[in-house]
Amino acid sequence: MSLVRATLTLVQAIAHHSAMTPPNPTPKKGRYHTEELYILQIAPFIFWLHSVALWIFAAFETLLYLTTIHPAPTYASPAICPASSSSPASSSPHVLPTTLFTIGSILILAGSVMRLDCFRALGELFTFDLTVHPAHKLVKTRLYGIVRHPSYTGSMFLVAGIALAHLTRGGWVAECIFNDWSRWALWALWWTWTISVGISRARAEDKQMRLLFGDDWVQYARDVHWWFVPYLL
């Protein structure tokens, strides 16, 4: 069953990479919200680290699967599974696609689809840094007709999905790296940061779009009331 998990982790890595690769470079002019706290400004870099982490997870999940076919040499086992003193295959019997892993995989795929749809909806307007394009327009179609900031919804889905898939029991991270409470402390900090980035940027974008589009934006905000999730936030 760890073959299924390894394969799905590879799919997660591909999907996340696609959704977190900037579709357009940041223009040299037109940036705003540059006074944002530095820890929030580095969101594009943090999400790049997420992609790197998922590729690493995919590689080690694959190695764990291979050790079920050909046990790793004794000297290699600590490198594959540091929290284990013997073969990963024997010391991590719960390496399998659990229900939480499956839910996490679905969230990662859903979040990736959301962000890719936002790339298509905004076209050249979509940049990872907040900018005003010379030909800026107010987009109200596709997911932007449901919530005002769907790309951040997608990012939240990705973060929640990674946590459910890889910080819960059953895989390389939980079984071989963080096999105690520390992974949940990491998750709490990680989720707090993610929500803080989303709210900070949503407020800044709303303020800037109102300045640019005036009454048109006001009517849009009335029609599309929610930032990220209808009837919730």
Image (spheres, rainbow, N blue to C red):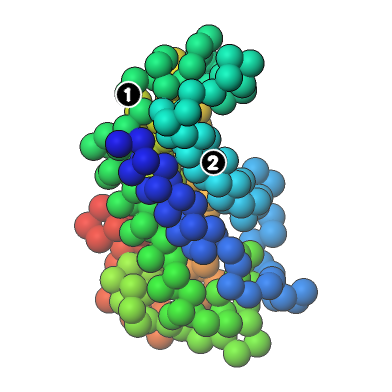
Q: Nearer the viewer, residue 182 or 3?
A: 3
Gap between marks 1 and 2, in whole Å? 18 Å
Three-letter code, disc 2: Ala
Considering the numbered disc 1 on the image, is that residue within a helix, a strand or a loop?
Answer: loop
What residue would you read off at disc 2?
A: 59
Q: Residue at x 49, y 74 (%)?
A: 119
Say above or below: 181 vs 215.
above
Image position of 232 with respect to 19: above or below: above
Q: Which residue is identified by label 1?
A: 94
- Which residue shows up at 43% across the image and 80% down it? 121
1 or 2: tag closer to the N-terminus:
2
- Residue type beneath disc 1: His
User: Few, some or many C-alpha atoms within 10 Å of disc 1 (few <14, some 14-19, many ≥20)?
Assistant: some
Please state which of residues 94 and 71 is positioned toward the viewer in this rendering. 71
In the current view of this chain or complex, which residue is farthest to the front? 70
Q: Residue at x 33, y 59 (%)?
A: 110
Mark 2 packing: few (<14 Cα in 10 Å), some, or many (20+)? Answer: some
Under circle 2, the secondary element is helix
Question: Which quarter of the figure is the N terminus placed in?
Answer: top left
What is the quadrant of the C terminus in the image? bottom left
